[in-house]
Image: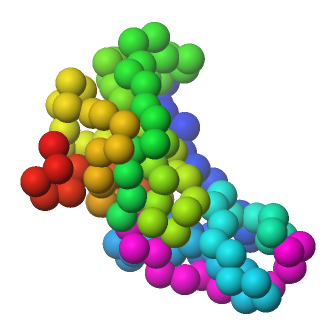
Amino acid sequence: MSAPVPVPNPDNAGFWDACRQGELRLQRCTRCGAWRHHPRPMCPRCGGLEHEWARASGRGVVHTFTIVHRPTLPAFDERVPYNVVAVRLDEEVFMVSNLVECSLDQIRIGLPVEVVFEPLTDEITLPKFRPRQGAA
């Protein structure tokens, strides 16, 4: 069984297009300026329907994490143990991903991280995170 692959749709296509180009772009409301992630049609702050795909810093900190020993899908059995991190980006939104270039025992809450990109298919490139230089 292969791992599930994200499916772009009208709300998130701008995100996946940018990732494929090696950029982290997030929706930003053009009415109130609020950043938002996961992509969605309406601003959670003001209810506005207008947005732009703005380049994000790609920097943040590990807000929380877990080490997976028993995955919920058999497709991930061969990867255990692996990490899942919730990163609080500098733009004050959260992104769930994996931490790479870091041993499991080095992961900690508050660890400064930066985005890196991992091609999965010709269409989908996943944003992952690694410790910022000198942070691990």
Note whether 83 is above or below 134 in the view shown: above
Depth check: give the residue in front, 60 or 27.
60
Residues shaded magenta: 46-58
Residue farthest front in this picture: 110
- Give the color scheme: rainbow, by chain, secondary structure or one colour: rainbow
> Magenta stretch: dominant SS?
loop
Task: Answer with the quarter of the image where residue 82 lies.
Answer: top left
Quarter assignment of residue 102: top left
Give the answer, above or below, for where 34 lies relative to 130.
Answer: below
Q: Position of residue 14 (x, y in %)?
A: 60, 75
Is residue 4 left or right of 37 when viewed as pictured? left
Q: Is residue 80 left or right of residue 106?
A: right
Q: Which residue is rendered at x = 58% and y = 60% of the image?
A: 93
The verdict on residue 61 being magenta is no
Where residue 103 appears, x then y in whole percent?
A: 18, 31
Q: Which residue ends up furthest to the top in the rendered image?
A: 70
